Amino acid sequence: MLNHKQCDAFLAVAETGSFEAAAIHLSITASAVTLRVQSLEKNLGHILIVRERPCYVTDAGRSLLNYLQHNRLREQDFLHQLTGQAQSFYTVNIATNADSLATWLLPSIKPCLTQHKIIAHFHVDDQSETHLLMQTGLVNACISAEPRAMQGCIAQPLGQMRYRLVANPEFVNTWFSQGLTREALTHAPAIIYNNKDQLHSNLLLQHFGLSPACYPHHVIPSSSAFAEAIFMGLGFGLVPDHQIEQRLKTGQLIDLTPKLNVEITLYWHHWKQQALALDQITQHLLQHAGENMNGAIK
């Protein structure tokens, strides 16, 4: 029989990445968290947490984490049915890329979250890696560019998110007055989201033969600040259609490569057997994601 307090301590460490943060989350001491996790490991006969900074789960810990996350949702289902919708909330953990969260995702699921009293905890990572958070058990579902579903899961296409390489007119006049040439690209400052973001580097490598080491680039790990930096002329970069449609129409931004736009197919990964709250989110996303993903630009 699993001990509830020990499992809560393990979950807190897995989710926060440290025993100290888990202690704050649980309102107990760090030593108490350590003792509970050690007792759980002794009872199960496996090391569950690798003690590094940040901490992360072992293979055995990943299996336990998945089991506990599923049980947590099943418990919420039971309490929801027992107490009625007016008195209880579901809580779900969803991994997503930052651009989706900053643009189309919230408008797509807001009615569902409100109607069905669902609390969403979003975990942000690159679209090429969000599915890894689901594999570790940290999230219940994810939005990912990975088309293959892991065992026991389903990956359903949501639509294609379109990006354009843009800059403001002043920046274009300064850096690309002779056109978007390979030479100009080696000097003009680009803007990327972070070092996991391969969209910009893949575009320049494939079409201009330039690796990231060949050109200067700002790193701005915030979707809103990233777009704002391009709007103000700090650099050029790939921005989702959803964030730039009005500025393109008014000439505040220029599409540098109108024939080379980047499109990424996004998939909704979820368990075949899942809680009612995730069923409702799944149905809502599959119905509304595509229509909200790229704004009005075609």
Image (cartoon, rainbow, N blue to C red):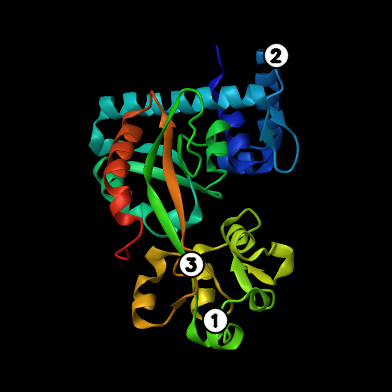
Comparing marks 1 and 3, which lies closer to the viewer? 1
Q: CA distance from mark 2 to mark 1?
A: 57 Å
Amino acid on which disc 3 is placed: Ser
Q: Quadrant of residue 76?
A: top left
Q: CA distance from mark 1 to mark 3?
A: 14 Å
Q: Nearer the viewer, residue 223 or 188?
A: 188
Disc sitting over residue 35 in the figure: none
Residue occupying image coordinates x 54% and y 63%: 222
Disc sitting over residue 45 in the figure: 2
Pointer 3 residue = 224
N-terminal of the pair, mark 3 or mark 2, is 2
Residue occupying image coordinates x 63% and y 66%: 208
x and y, in percent, of residue 81 in the image = 26, 26
Amino acid on which disc 2 is placed: Gly
Q: Quadrant of residue 136?
A: top right
Outermost residue, top side: 1
N-terminal of the pair, mark 2 or mark 1, is 2
Q: Residues within 10 Å of mark 3 (few under 14, many from 20)?
A: some
N-terminal of the pair, mark 1 or mark 3, is 3
- Up/down of 138 relative to 206, above or below: above
Comparing marks 3 and 2, which lies closer to the viewer? 3
Q: Nearer the viewer, residue 32 or 189?
A: 189
Disc sitting over residue 233 in the figure: 1
Q: Nearer the viewer, residue 201 or 292?
A: 201
Q: Describe the element under mark 1 as helix, strand or loop.
A: loop
Look at the numbered discs 2 and 1 and tell me whether their residues touch, using CB distance below 8 Å: no
Q: Left of 138 or right of it: where is 250?
A: left
Q: CA distance from mark 3 to mark 2?
A: 46 Å
- Up/down of 230 relative to 38, above or below: below
x and y, in percent, of residue 59 in the image = 66, 24
